[in-house]
C-alpha cells in the first residue's frame, strides 16, 4: 500500500495541526514489545490489529499520537501502541484527553474505552466530551458485559441478563450508545463490528478525518463472559437480514440483493420488503444533516436482539471544535491584550511608600 | 461651622445589611480608599451562602468588617468601633459583637413595624432605651438617597438601591477617605448604564455632603497613613493574589498555564480571574464536574502545561482518585484547596482549616503529596509560586491550602520586583542514544523525566498500575512495589532539603513557649503574641508554610521549647501530625465555628496556658 496514494484519500483537516512523518510507516511500527495480555480469542486483538494497520495511512508522526484509556479490558490498549499512552482511571479518560487535546492542538488524541468505562462510571465525561466537541476520537469497545471484574452485567447488557451479580436477571434497561451520543450533541457517531476488518477500517478512517469529538462504537466479542453476543450480526445465515450498512446519500437497502429497505411509516422508521414499496419511499441516509432526527431514528431500529442493526456513520457534521475556539480566543487576546506581568500585578490603584518614610 | 477633627490610631468599621444591600461592594470600596490613603488594613467579609436570602431576615444579613490603622496590623479586628446597620436584622445580628459606648449608624427608614417583626423586635429599639449603651446616629438613609436622586429619572425603588453608596459617602467623609477611586470605579462599573452610574455618584456625594452639613455628626476622624516598608503597594485579596502567583509562575517557568476547574465557593473567583488573562496564554477549562476538572488538568500536565485545579473541601473529596493517579504518574500538578466549613456541604462561605488531614491522607495506598499553606491574602502569591516550584522540581502533585478568610479578605500588598521572583525551570526530557526510561530518577531530587508528547524517541506508556523501577512497565513484583513505594515517599521527603531554615520570632530571645501556627491564623496569632508579650511574658512565634514534608529543623526546634502551643481552626489536625512525627506534646487551641479566631480570645487562651509554665 503506497503511503501517498492512501493519504490523499483521507481528508485530514482534523489533523491539520499534527506534524506529518517523513518516513513511510508500517503496522509494525505501531507495535510495542509488550506481551498482549487479553484472553485468547478476544475481539480486542482484531481491533488492535486494525488500528495498527490503519494508522500508517494517516502519516502522522508517532510521537504526536496519544492513546488515553480508562479502566477495563479495552483500556489496556495504549500499552500495545508504540505511541504516547496514558492508562488512567475508571471512566475519566474523556476528561483527561480533553485537557490534553485542548492544550496541545499538535497532537492526535485517541480515547479507548468500554461500555462500562464510558457509559457507567464515566457516563458524565462521555456526554460532556461529545457536546464540547474537543478534537478526540473515542473508540468504545462494546461487549455488553464487564470483563475485567469477571462477568457482571454492563449498562449495555440486555434487560433480564443472568450474570454473577444478577442471578435472577438484570433489572435495568440498557443504554443504546449511538442514541446516547446523538442525544449528547455529538458531531460524529458511527458503529462497526470487530469481525469486519474492512468496515472497521473504513469507519476508523472517517472518524480520524472528523474534526471534533468522534465516537465509534465497536461491537466486540468477549468470548469468556458474553461469547456470541453479536453472532446474529456475524452468522452468514442471519447477517444479511439483520445488519444494515449505512452509506451517506444512499437509499437504505440491505439483505440479499437489497431485498429489505427502510421506510417511514407514521413518522417512524421501519423495515419492509423492498418490492412492496416504491423506490422513492426508501429512506436515503443523510449523515450530514444538521438535524440528528434521522440518525436518531436509525439508532432506534434494532430491538434488544439486535435485529436490524445499522452500522457505518450515523452522523458526521461540522461544528467548531472546542480546542480551536479556545486557541482562537487566546490568539485574539494575545493580539489585542497586553501581557505585561508588572502592569497586571500593579493593577489600577497603587500607592508608594518612599524610602525616606521608612521606620 | 468648622467641625472638630479627632486623631485616631486605628478603627474597626463593620458594614451590615441585607445580602442584597451591596454591603460587600461598599466595604470593598471603602477598603480601596483606605488602601490608597496608605493605612495598613485587614478585612473580614462575612456573608450567607444564599444569593438572596429572604429580605430583612437574620439569616440574610451580610457584613463586611474593615480594620485600618496608622501602624502595622494583622487582623480584621475583634470588635467593631462603628457598626453601620442598614436594617433591623443587621442591627440585631451584629449588636452582640459591639462593645458598649461604640457608634451605631443606623438606617432609620427601614425600622418599619413589618421589618421589626421579622426579626422579633416587639418595639422599635430606636425609640426606646434598648440602645442606650451605644452612641446611635439615626440616619434616614433610604429617603435621603431617594431625595438626592429625584432628578435622575430613576424610580424610587431603583433610586433606593444606591443607599449603600450614600452610606459609603458618609463614612468616607467621617474618615477623610480619598474619593477619586470610588468615583472612577462607579463610572467604570456602570459604563453601560450611564443613568445608574450618575445615580450612584450622586448618592455617594450626597452621603459625603450630609456628613459635612448635618449636626448629627459633629466629629470626623483622621487616621494617618501607616509607616510601612518602602515600596509600591496595592490592596489585594487572597484569591486574586493566588491567581497572580500562578500567572507569574507560568511566566517564570515558560510553561503555559492550564486550569481545569468546577465552580465551588470560595474558590470560584480564581477561575473567574484566570479566565480574564488569555493574553498571558492562560487556558481555563470549566469542566462538567470536580473529577473532570482535575482530569483535564492532569491531561494538560501530561502534555507539558503548568497544570492547576482549584476547589474547596467537598470538591477535593471528589478529586482524590485522580490525585492518586498523579502521584503514580509523577507529573506536576497544583491542587488549590480553598478550605471552607465542613463536613459535607458544611458552611460554604465560612472559613476553617479542616482539610489538612484530607490533603495529607485522603487517598488509597501510600500516596504522599506535598502540602504548602498560605498565611495571608498577599502571601497567597508567594505560596502559589512555591507550590509550583515543588511541583515542577519534584514532578509531583502539590496541595496549596488557602481558606475562605484568606480568599475573600484583603490587605495591602507590596508589589514584588519581577526580577526577584524565584526562577522556575521545567526541563523536558530529550531523546538520547540510550533507550528511554520514563522512571529513571534524578539522583538528587528523585524526580523522573517529564517526557511530553511530540518528542520523537520518547514514546512511552504509563498509567495507574504499579510500574517497574526505571522502565515504567507494568509490574506486580513484590520487591519492586516495595521499592517504588519507598521511592515515591523518599522523593517527597527530600523536598525538605530545599526548604530554608525556619525563622522563629522571639524578640526576647529567652522564650520557653513557642506558639506554632499554619495558614490563615498567622495574623491573629501574631497579634495575640504581641499582646501577651506586652503583658510581660515572652513567647516565641513560628508559622509553617510547609506541612508536608515538615522542614528538616522543625523537630529539633519544637523540642527546644518547654511548651508548644498550636492554635488551629480545627480539632487538632496539625497537632496530630506533629505528635505522631516528633512525639512532642503539642497543646492545641481549637475553634471550629466557621469564623477566624479573635485576637482577644486567643490572648486569653494563651495567657491561661502560660500561667502553668515557669517562665
Image (spheres, coloured by chain):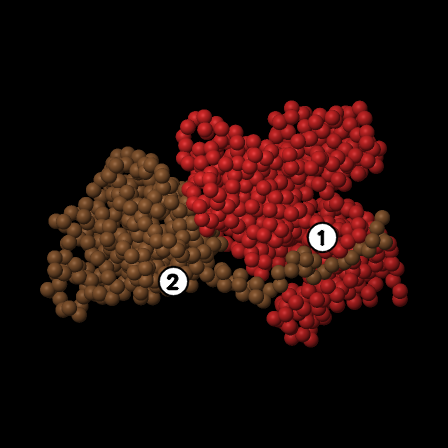
Chain colours: A brown, B red
Q: Does A248 sit above or below residue B57?
A: below
Q: Which image quarter: residue B540?
A: top right
The one of B206 and B462 positioned closer to us in this rendering: B462
Letter of the chain that mark 2 sits on in the rendering: A
Up/down of A264 relative to B345, above or below: below
Mark 2, Cα crowd under 10 Å, few <14 / some 14-19 / many 20+, is few
Q: What residue is shown at x 33% (from left), y 36% (from top)?
A: A35
Q: Which label is found at residue A13?
A: 2
Name the residue furthest front. B433
Point out the image quarter for the N terminus of chain A: bottom left
The quadrant where residue B388 appears = top right
> Whole-percent x and y of residue B3?
87, 62
Q: What residue is drawn where x is 40% and y is 47%? A: A83
What residue is shown at x 14% (from left), y 61% (from top)? Answer: A258
Q: Is residue A288 visible?
A: yes
Query: At which x and y percent is residue B15?
Result: 71, 54
Residue found at x 73% / y 33%: B515
Q: Which residue is mark 1?
A: B417
Mark seen at residue B1: none
Amino acid at each position: 500500500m503506497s503511503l501517498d496514494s492512501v493519504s490523499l484519500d483521507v481528508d485530514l483537516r482534523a489533523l491539520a495541526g499534527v506534524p506529518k512523518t517523513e518516513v513511510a510507516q508500517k503496522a509494525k511500527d505501531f507495535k510495542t514489545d509488550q506481551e498482549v495480555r487479553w484472553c485468547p480469542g478476544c475481539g480486542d486483538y482484531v481491533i488492535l490489529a486494525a488500528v495498527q494497520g490503519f494508522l500508517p495511512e494517516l502519516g502522522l508522526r508517532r510521537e504526536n499520537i496519544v492513546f488515553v484509556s480508562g479502566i477495563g479490558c479495552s483500556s489496556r490498549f495504549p500499552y500495545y501502541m508504540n505511541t504516547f499512552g496514558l492508562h488512567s482511571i475508571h471512566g475519566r479518560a474523556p476528561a483527561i484527553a480533553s485537557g490534553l487535546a485542548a492544550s496541545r492542538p499538535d497532537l492526535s488524541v485517541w480515547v479507548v474505552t468500554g461500555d462500562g468505562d464510558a457509559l457507567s462510571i464515566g457516563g458524565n465525561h462521555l456526554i460532556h466530551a461529545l457536546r464540547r466537541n474537543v478534537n478526540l476520537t473515542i473508540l468504545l469497545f462494546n461487549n455488553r458485559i464487564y470483563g475485567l471484574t469477571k462477568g457482571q452485567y454492563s449498562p449495555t447488557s440486555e434487560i433480564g441478563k443472568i450474570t454473577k451479580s444478577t442471578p435472577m436477571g438484570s433489572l435495568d434497561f440498557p443504554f443504546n450508545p449511538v442514541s446516547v451520543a446523538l442525544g449528547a450533541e455529538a458531531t460524529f457517531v458511527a458503529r462497526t463490528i470487530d469481525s469486519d476488518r474492512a468496515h472497521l477500517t473504513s469507519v476508523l478512517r472517517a472518524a480520524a478525518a472528523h474534526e471534533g469529538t468522534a465516537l465509534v462504537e465497536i461491537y466486540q466479542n468477549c468470548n469468556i463472559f458474553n461469547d456470541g453476543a453479536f453472532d446474529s450480526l456475524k452468522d452468514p445465515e442471519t447477517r444479511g437480514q439483520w445488519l444494515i450498512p449505512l452509506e451517506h446519500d444512499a437509499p437504505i437497502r440491505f439483505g440479499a440483493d437489497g431485498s429489505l429497505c427502510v421506510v417511514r411509516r407514521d413518522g417512524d422508521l421501519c423495515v419492509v420488503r423492498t418490492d412492496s414499496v416504491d423506490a422513492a419511499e426508501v429512506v436515503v441516509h443523510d449523515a450530514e444533516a444538521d438535524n440528528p432526527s434521522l440518525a436518531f431514528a436509525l439508532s432506534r431500529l434494532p430491538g434488544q436482539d439486535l435485529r436490524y442493526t445499522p452500522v457505518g456513520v450515523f452522523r458526521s457534521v461540522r461544528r467548531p471544535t472546542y480546542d480551536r475556539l479556545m486557541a482562537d480566543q487566546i490568539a485574539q487576546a494575545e493580539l489585542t491584550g497586553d501581557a505585561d506581568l508588572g502592569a497586571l500585578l500593579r493593577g489600577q490603584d497603587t500607592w508608594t511608600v518612599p524610602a525616606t518614610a521608612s521606620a | 461651622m468648622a467641625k472638630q477633627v479627632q486623631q485616631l490610631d486605628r478603627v474597626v468599621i463593620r458594614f451590615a445589611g441585607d445580602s442584597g444591600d451591596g454591603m460587600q461592594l461598599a466595604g470593598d470600596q471603602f477598603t480601596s480608599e483606605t488602601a490608597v490613603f496608605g493605612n495598613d488594613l485587614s478585612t473580614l467579609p462575612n456573608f450567607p451562602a444564599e444569593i438572596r436570602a429572604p429580605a430583612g431576615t437574620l439569616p440574610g444579613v451580610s457584613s463586611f468588617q474593615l480594620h485600618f490603622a496608622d501602624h502595622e496590623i494583622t487582623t480584621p479586628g475583634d470588635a467593631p468601633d462603628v457598626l453601620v446597620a442598614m436594617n433591623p436584622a443587621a442591627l440585631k445580628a451584629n449588636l452582640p459583637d459591639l462593645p458598649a459606648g461604640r457608634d451605631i449608624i443606623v438606617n432609620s427608614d427601614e425600622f418599619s413595624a413589618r421589618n421589626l417583626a421579622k426579626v422579633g423586635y416587639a418595639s422599635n429599639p430606636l425609640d426606646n432605651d434598648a440602645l442606650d449603651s451605644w452612641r446611635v446616629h439615626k440616619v434616614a438613609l433610604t429617603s435621603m438617597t431617594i431625595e438626592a436622586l429625584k432628578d435622575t429619572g430613576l424610580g424610587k425603588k431603583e433610586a433606593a438601591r444606591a443607599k449603600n453608596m450614600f452610606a459609603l459617602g458618609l463614612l468616607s467623609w467621617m474618615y477623610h477617605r480619598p474619593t477619586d477611586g470610588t468615583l472612577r470605579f462607579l463610572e467604570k462599573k456602570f459604563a453601560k448604564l450611564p443613568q445608574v452610574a450618575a445615580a450612584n455618584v450622586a448618592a455617594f456625594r450626597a452621603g459625603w455632603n450630609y456628613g459635612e452639613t448635618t449636626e448629627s455628626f459633629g466629629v470626623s476622624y483622621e487616621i494617618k497613613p501607616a509607616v510601612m516598608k518602602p515600596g509600591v503597594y496595592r490592596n489585594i485579596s487572597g484569591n486574586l493574589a493566588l491567581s497572580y502567583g500562578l500567572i507569574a509562575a507560568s511566566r517564570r517557568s515558560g510553561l503555559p498555564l492550564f486550569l481545569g476547574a468546577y465552580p465551588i465557593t470560595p474558590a470560584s473567583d480564581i477561575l473567574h480571574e484566570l479566565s480574564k488573562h488569555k493574553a498571558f496564554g492562560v487556558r481555563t477549562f470549566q469542566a462538567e464536574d470536580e473529577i473532570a476538572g482535575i482530569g483535564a488538568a492532569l491531561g494538560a500536565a501530561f502534555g507539558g502545561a503548568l497544570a492547576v485545579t482549584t476547589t474547596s473541601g467537598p470538591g477535593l473529596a471528589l478529586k482524590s482518585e485522580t490525585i492518586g493517579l498523579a502521584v503514580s504518574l509523577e507529573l506536576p500538578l497544583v491542587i488549590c484547596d480553598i478550605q471552607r466549613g465542613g463536613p459535607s456541604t458544611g458552611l460554604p462561605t465560612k472559613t476553617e482549616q479542616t482539610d489538612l488531614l484530607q490533603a495529607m491522607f485522603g487517598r488509597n495506598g501510600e500516596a504522599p503529596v506535598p502540602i504548602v499553606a498560605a498565611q495571608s491574602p498577599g502571601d497567597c502569591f508567594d505560596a502559589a509560586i512555591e507550590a509550583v516550584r515543588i511541583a515542577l522540581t519534584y514532578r509531583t502533585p502539590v496541595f496549596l491550602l488557602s481558606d475562605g478568610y484568606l480568599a475573600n479578605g484583603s490587605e495591602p500588598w507590596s508589589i514584588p520586583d519581577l526580577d526577584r521572583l524565584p526562577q522556575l525551570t521545567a526541563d523536558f526530557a530529550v531523546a538520547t542514544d540510550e533507550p528511554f526510561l520514563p522512571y529513571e530518577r534524578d539522583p538528587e531530587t528523585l524526580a523522573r523525566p517529564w517526557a511530553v508528547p511530540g518528542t520523537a524517541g520518547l514514546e512511552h506508556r504509563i498509567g495507574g498500575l504499579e510500574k517497574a523501577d526505571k522502565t515504567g512497565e507494568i509490574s506486580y513484583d513484590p520487591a519492586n512495589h516495595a521499592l517504588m513505594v519507598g521511592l515515591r515517599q523518599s522523593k517527597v521527603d527530600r523536598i525538605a532539603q530545599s526548604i530554608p531554615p525556619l525563622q522563629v520570632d522571639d524578640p526576647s530571645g529567652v522564650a520557653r513557649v513557642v506558639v506554632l501556627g499554619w495558614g490563615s491564623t498567622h495574623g491573629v496569632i501574631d497579634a495575640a503574641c504581641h499582646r501577651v508579650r506586652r503583658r510581660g511574658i515572652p513567647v516565641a512565634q513560628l508559622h509553617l508554610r510547609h506541612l508536608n514534608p515538615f522542614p528538616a529543623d522543625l523537630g529539633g526546634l519544637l523540642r527546644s521549647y518547654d511548651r508548644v502551643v498550636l492554635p488551629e481552626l480545627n480539632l487538632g489536625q496539625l497537632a496530630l501530625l506533629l505528635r505522631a512525627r516528633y512525639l512532642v506534646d503539642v497543646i492545641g487551641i481549637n475553634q471550629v465555628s466557621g469564623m477566624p479566631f479573635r485576637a482577644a480570645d486567643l490572648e486569653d487562651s494563651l495567657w491561661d496556658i502560660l500561667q502553668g509554665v515557669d517562665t
